[in-house]
Image: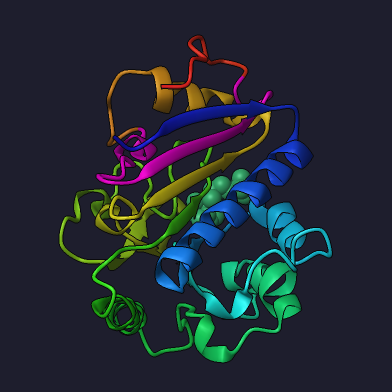
Amino acid sequence: MSAREIKVVKDIDALSAHAANLFVDVGRESIALNGTFDVSLAGGSTPRNLYRLLASERHRHELDWKRLSFFFGDERNVPDDSLDSNYLMASETLLAPLDLASNQVHRWRTELSSVDEVVRNYESELIEHFKRSKRGFDLVLLGLGTDAHTASLFPHTAALRETERLAVANWVEKLNDYRLTTTFPVINNALNVMFLVSGSEKAEAVFNVLEGEFRPDNYPAQMVNPMNGNLFWLLDEAAASKLKRLDST
Ligand code: 6PG
């Protein structure tokens, strides 16, 4: 039986420290088992501290980084040098400081001519990468929006119903733009999924997803349930403040 764990820690610093230790533990296990560690990175702002910590003197010597391959769970429909780019955030905080080989990092090539082209390119990279191993990601990092979206799987959007494609361009009405995202089949095929959620503004969404009625169209993160994988919810006290049942399930 795969683990389902909710861990509540004091604040964003404690959250990042705990996540960094878990990242290294999972990485060491993956590398020992398969010689590789395939990671899908989360975007947004919450993981920034974690990424900086992993590349810091505190952790950078704990993993054989040349064994890692980095993908992105989702991306905004922006150039990769835009301040909104998830790739730019991860590159500045984690990827560039680790001095990785270019073939270790698989970004959404948002410079291509259309979102469909970007998605086709990314999906082919995913298929190419995993066709040898027949496994999924060893670790998928996820954030949670205040509307209970995760990756770019937003409430009431078409991507929530995707069961075949690995990557799609998801039209998000409230953003009046496409978001590029991997789908639940990719996330739920991972060996480990780790949510990182911080701040009181997320407390309602955390409660709805973890203790509310099962309404995945309203609370998409409820669809994250790795079939043969571990699911870790790492929350700080503010984000967990509306939870009533804090037993680890
Ligand atoms: C993105 C993320 C998204 C994010 C949540 C939380 O592209 O923004 O993939 O799913 O994780 O919106 O964002 P914050 O960490 O900035 O609160």
Find residue 108 and report its horizontal and vertical position in percent: 45, 78
Of residue 221 and residue 171, the one placed in the foreground of this image is 221
Is-magenta flag for residue 236?
yes
Say if residue 66 shows up in the picture.
Answer: yes
Of residue 171 and residue 120, the one placed in the foreground of this image is 120
Q: Is residue 186 above or below residue 107?
A: above
Q: Residue at x 30, y 68 (%)?
A: 167
Find residue 155 and report its horizontal and vertical position in percent: 35, 41
Find residue 138 and report its horizontal and vertical position in percent: 42, 60
Find residue 13 and report its horizontal and vertical position in percent: 78, 41
Residue positioned most to the left: 164
Is-magenta flag for residue 106?
no
Q: What segment is highlighted magenta in the picture?
A: 219-240
192 with respect to 167 (left or right): right
Of residue 219 and residue 57, the one placed in the foreground of this image is 57
Residue positioned most to the right: 57
Q: Residue at x 26, y 80 (%)?
A: 132
240 with respect to 116 (left or right): right
Residue positioned most to the top: 244
Task: Quarter of the image for the C terminus: give it.
Answer: top left
Say if residue 39 shows up in the picture.
Answer: no
Task: Quarter of the image for the N terminus: give it.
Answer: top left
